Amino acid sequence: MVYVFDGEPPELKEAEIKRRMQIREEATVKYEEALRRKEIEKARMYAQMTSRLKDVMVNDAKSLLRLMGVPWVQAPSEGEAQASYMAAKGDVWAVISQDHDSLLFGAPMLVRNVTISGRRKLPRKKVYIEVVPEVVELDRVLKGLSITREQLIDIGILIGTDFNPKGVKGMGPKTALKMIRDHGSLEKLLPTLKGADFPVDPQKIREIFLHPRVSNNYKIEWREPDVEEVIDFLCRERDFSEERVLKAVDKVAEGLRKIRGKTTLEAWF
């Protein structure tokens, strides 16, 4: 396992970032209103939408990973782009993300739905559904759809990406796929689209996916966890329960002992 942290987002992502900020601000207002009306379930739902990732949280995560002996990489820009680059180089086996953009960035293998609980709550419902890991192989997708990666990117631009969230009005995945197949590329398709409005030059979006900002300045090393330092960091500096932390660290140590030196598939079971 290697963790990849986002860096500075591309300028074209500014609109999407502002949209997410607006959603959080609106959710904060609704959260406070729900609390005043003592509608606890609604308040909980809106509270989840107000979460913000602060720099101190990121720094703490990096510190804990280092103490646990788990490598992490700082991406210069998009985390999915860096992870996809590392997977394409063979430094890692796959990219674990919920974001299909990883495929547009060229990840040979994307793994989704990697969770601890194995279930996911449906939005605004008291209903949970089971989720299982999903492996998406880029080559199989492209061959199965009879398209190239460049055409996949064009399809993404038509239906919307982080860099043009709205896409073309009324354009769904099936229609976009058919149109790109029929015309070959976005450039040839655009003159036939009446009223299609692209606030951003599609070529600029394509360049972000084809030639993203990535770094070779990383070193992947797995080490034994420093148990004393982990306890000191979490329990004495961050006030976690020492008993719970010790149990978690013991599980990690036990897992490491079990897998060390095993060479056959049967041994893992």
Image (cartoon, rainbow, N blue to C red):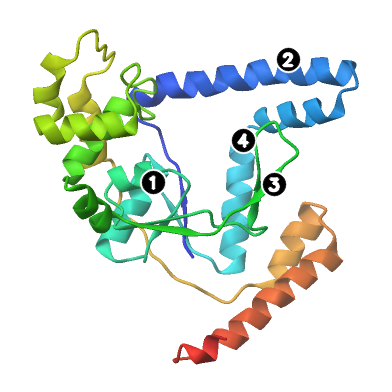
**Residue located beneath label 1 in the image:** 80
* Labels 2 & 3 near each other (Cβ < 8 A): no
**First along the sequence among labels 1 and 3:** 1
Residue 72, numbered label: none
- Secondary element under disc 4, as helix, strand or loop, is loop
- Secondary element under disc 2, as helix, strand or loop, is helix
Residue 54, numbered label: 4
Distance (Cα) linking label 3 and label 4:
29 Å
Q: What amino acid type should be assigned to the residue bearing mark 1? A: Glu
- Secondary element under disc 3, as helix, strand or loop, is strand
Which quadrant of the figure has residue 172?
top left
48 with respect to 189 (left or right): right
155 with respect to 185 (left or right): right
Q: What amino acid type should be assigned to the residue bearing mark 2? A: Val
Label 2 packing within 10 angstroms: few (<14), some (14-19), many (20+): few
Distance (Cα) linking label 4 and label 2:
20 Å
The percent coordinates of residue 178 (x first, y second) are 21, 33
* Labels 1 & 4 near each other (Cβ < 8 A): no
- Secondary element under disc 1, as helix, strand or loop, is helix
Query: At x 53% / y 91%, what residue is drawn?
Result: 267
* Labels 3 & 4 near each other (Cβ < 8 A): no
**Residue located beneath label 2 in the image:** 29
The percent coordinates of residue 73 (x first, y second) are 43, 55
Distance (Cα) linking label 2 and label 3:
26 Å
Q: Which is nearer the eye, 124 or 242? A: 124
Residue 21 visible to the viewer: yes
**First along the sequence among labels 4 and 2:** 2
**Residue located beneath label 3 in the image:** 128
* Labels 1 & 3 near each other (Cβ < 8 A): no
Query: At x 75% / y 65%, what residue is drawn?
Result: 231
